[in-house]
Amino acid sequence: MSGNAGSPVDLAEASRLAHAVLDEVETAVVGKRDALTLVLCGILAGGHVLLEDLPGLGKTLAARSFAQTLGLGFRRAQFTPDLLPADLTGSFIYDQGRGEFSFRPGPLFTGLLLADEINRTPPKTQAALLEAMQERQVSVEGETFPLAPPFHVLATANPIEYEGTYPLPEAQLDRFLMRVPFGYPSLEDEWEVLRRRMERRREEQTLRGVLTADELLAVQAAVETVTVDPSVGRYCVALAAATRHHRQALVGASPRGGLALVLVARAYAVVAGRDFVTPEDVKAVAVPALGHRITVRPELWMSDVSGASIVGDVLSTTPAPAARESARP
Amino acid sequence: VTDHRVTVAACLLVALASAVAASTTGIERQDVTSVTEGGPEPREDPADRTEEGTRSATADDPDASDRDRGAFRLTLPGVAVGLLVLALAVLVLAVVARIRLVVHRRRRLDATGLRGPPGVPPTDEEASEKEVAEALEAGITALAAGSARNAVVAAWVALEDAAARAGVPGEEADTATDLVRRMLAAHPVDQAALELLATLYREARFSGHELTERHRRQAGRCLEQLRHQLGGVAR
């Protein structure tokens, strides 16, 4: 929070920068504009994002690309079954020269942490990560170290392989602002991936930094100024509440879900170049913002019902803000 | 959901009835043919033949009786009659479904209050066309009054009214974008004008900044354009 962080960015500029970031990331991650937009919205809204899909769809590449374009420090932690909390947070090491213990920070002390295959590590280490995500600080041996903003976690999880995994319980999934699926590219896009790799003549690709960490903070501050009409806010609350009463849901979205919906919708509005949130924005981000917060009834586990399908259902039945109730002076 | 169940049940019933009709006509034809088959055979008592032709014929020829009583052997005229009955049934069903749809749509319109004054059902084309034009006209009038923000919202309300009268009622869960999509699917109206009006409405309804006379004029142009088109396509 130093240097030119004081220079505020207006919303038009924030929108332009967001598009510049997306364009740059898209040179590395082909044909995933929608998913990338959602991930960027999660970061601009100040949250952490869970990327969930099969291996090889570009999740890690997307995370690294965002780190480069957003000018953030990047660390990657591969979550293995034997990973310990201290491996993430860091620990005190005895410094012989000075004759005292000094703290050696772990991979958590960075701008953007890629937590790869987060469901492969036991709950103890997961809890350490999620606590750091929530509190934005790390406690080691009674001493607390704050994590300097911007600090964001992009975690990946493989939804198919369950052998030797520790699925995150809903209470912990709730800490993620959004869960974004990636999905397969179209055949044309897939060929484009191959073509670009051959053109590049090497494996790794480096992206231009579009923002600095300070500019990212300024854009995040600009997102905070977006107008949310009370009717749109109530619409978010109604959507979150409706998931609780859905007959296929055992547990619906918490109030934190409704809050996430508003926060992400604001960032989405900025990316779309507006300084106000519309019900369309809310609808566009509802599935990634709410889907992972819903527990489906156990008797429906073998069916097609998922958190996403329940949110889809709720979206098609919950009354959206109408034109007629808006009598303004 | 119950509506669907009723329709499916009616479908099954009619299908069953027509199948029975088809098979019985087939059997009748079978009986007649068996009489004519029995005809040329020599008889001891010719008087018996006329009254109880069927019985005597089957009595004389055990093979024929098996054919007649046992399997439903369908003959060509029998099938034709059956198909005719089936076609009629389908026609009746289609008419019933159409009536149900119209009634349902009208009831929903009444429920959402998007329809014009009750007692003036837009049954014939001219009335409906006139209503659509009237709704848009009302919007153009409303545009002139009040603040630019309220005027633009009023223009959108007028468009929603017009859409409902043109057979595209608004759903509760609809956003402006959803309504635009549905209207474009139903009528060949100008996409650009419709989307511009929706954008103006969203800005007027949900933004915090001031709206200007320019917004008002733009909304007016959109409505004029749509009145031109939607007034012409209303059913």
Image (cartoon, coloured by chain):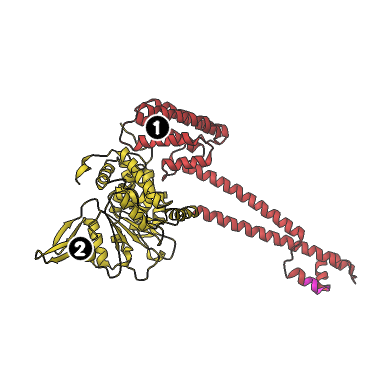
Chain colours: A yellow, B red
What x and y, as percent, mark residue B225? 49, 30
Callout 2 secondary element: strand
- The residue to which callout 2 is attached is A90
Image point (28%, 68%), residue name: A122
* Up/down of B209 relative to A52, above or below: above
For badge 2, the amino acid type reads: Gly
What x and y, as percent, mark residue A309? 41, 56
Image point (24%, 39%), residue name: A8
Q: Quadrant of residue B175?
A: top left
- The residue to which callout 1 is attached is B154
Front residue (pair B108, A29): A29
> Quadrant location of the C terminus of chain B?
top right
Q: Which residue lies furthest to the bottom in this view?
A: B62
* Up/down of B17 relative to A34, above or below: below
Callout 1 secondary element: helix
Residue B170 painted magenta? no
Judging from the image, mark 1 belongs to the subunit labelled B
For badge 1, the amino acid type reads: Ala
* Up/down of A290 relative to A13, above or below: below
What x and y, as percent, mark residue A139? 17, 61
Part of the protein shown in magenta? B60-65
Q: Main SS type for the magenta part?
A: helix
Q: How many labels does the image show?
A: 2
Marks 1, 2: nearer the viewer = 2
| A95 with respect to B124 (left or right) | left
